[in-house]
Image (tube, grey):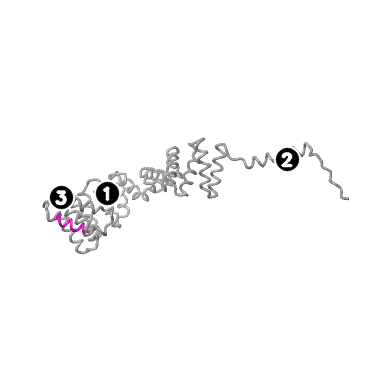
């Protein structure tokens, strides 16, 4: 007959040990609660590429302290990694305002701001990157473009001029500079830049097209029309050249010119990018030509 093993009541020492193990296990699985715990958990999740989880921890940490540099930076890059760019911009811009001249923050702001069309923030980031060591010339054209987008045409002109001066063998730099000069309401200088480019590089259709448009803006329609007609004869398939000629014709007072412009617009309507708003131009010209 088998002997039954006697049941022994656990000793107090055993109970204490078991209870201590349970407490230790509980502490190991305890959810982060303090600011430092939440921030550490968020950064750990970020380094493991669990960006959604990282955002959850970091957002909770931000509710406790919203001005921590690391917190704002990692929140921004977490959102950036998942292409939630509006939120990424919000946090990196806040970090940039709280911690000016921080190169790491500025570099991230520089990559995010243009994607959400925050042009001034992009310019601010460029200024910090230059201030902290980057050579200014590498940013001339970008800064010019962002100022142009903001309507700061004179500032754009200055940077395009600097870009042209260090890359004077590139025809595109003259086109950019001429366009900026026109935007800054210096049409005569804009045309002079194109004439300089023609003298330097020879006759170029883009130079001629831009010059024709600028002459039209000056009210020199005969000169403009002569240049643009020649371009259309040589490149009848070009929507750009046809559009420029039609615009010049439509700007003139003679009925025959307006009718020719209307015919060009109607011919182009079905094959032209809607952004050019050819349909609106057609409607406007038809109104002008009523009764004529």
Front-lying residue, 62 or 154: 62
At mark 3, the secondary structure is: helix
At mark 1, the secondary structure is: helix
**The residue stretch that appears in magenta:** 257-266
Please identify the residue farthest to the bottom as the structure is shown: 234
Distance between the Cα atoms at labels 3 and 1? 32 Å
**Mark 3 or mark 1, earlier in chain:** 1
Front-lying residue, 1 or 52: 1
Above or below: residue 221 compared with residue 233: above
In the picture, measured across the screen, residue 280 lies left or right of residue 291, that is right
Tell me which residue sits at (25%, 47%) in the image.
183
Above or below: residue 259 compared with residue 157: below
How packed is label 3: few (under 14 Cα within 10 Å), some, or many (20 or more)? some
Distance between the Cα atoms at labels 2 and 3? 94 Å
In the picture, measured across the screen, residue 111 lies left or right of residue 261, that is right
Q: Which residue is mark 1?
A: 180
**Is disc 2 in contact with disc 1, using a CB cutoff of under 8 Å?**
no
**Mark 2 or mark 1, earlier in chain:** 2
Tell me which residue sits at (55%, 49%) in the image.
48
Q: Which residue is mark 3?
A: 288
Q: Which residue is mark 2?
A: 18
Q: Quadrant of residue 278?
A: bottom left
């Amino acid at each position: 007959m088998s002997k039954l093993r006697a049941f022994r009541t656990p000793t107090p020492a055993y109970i204490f040990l078991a209870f201590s193990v349970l407490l230790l296990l509980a502490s190991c699985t305890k959810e982060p609660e303090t600011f430092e715990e939440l921030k550490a958990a968020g950064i750990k999740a970020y380094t493991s590429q669990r960006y959604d989880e990282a955002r959850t921890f970091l957002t909770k940490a931000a509710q406790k302290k919203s001005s921590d540099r690391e917190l704002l930076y990692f929140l921004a890059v977490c959102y950036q990694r998942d292409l939630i760019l509006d939120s990424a911009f919000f946090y990196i811009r806040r970090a940039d305002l709280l911690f000016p001249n921080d190169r790491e923050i500025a570099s991230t702001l520089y990559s995010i701001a243009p994607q959400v069309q925050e042009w001034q923030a992009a310019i601010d980031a460029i200024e910090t990157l230059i201030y902290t060591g980057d050579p200014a010339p590498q940013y001339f054209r970008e800064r010019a473009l962002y100022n142009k987008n903001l309507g700061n045409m004179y500032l754009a002109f200055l940077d395009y001029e600097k870009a042209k001066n260090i890359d004077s063998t590139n025809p595109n730099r003259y086109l950019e500079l001429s366009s900026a000069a026109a935007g800054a309401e210096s049409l005569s200088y804009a045309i002079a830049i194109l004439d300089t480019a023609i003298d330097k590089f020879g006759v170029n259709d883009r130079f001629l097209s831009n010059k024709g448009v600028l002459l039209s803006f000056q009210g020199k329609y005969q000169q403009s029309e002569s240049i643009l007609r020649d371009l259309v004869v040589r490149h009848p398939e070009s929507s750009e050249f046809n559009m420029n000629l039609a615009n010049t014709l439509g700007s003139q007072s003679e009925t025959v010119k307006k009718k020719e412009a209307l015919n060009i617009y109607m011919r182009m309507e079905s094959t032209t990018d809607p952004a050019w708003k050819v349909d609106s131009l057609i409607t406007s010209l038809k109104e002008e030509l009523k009764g004529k």
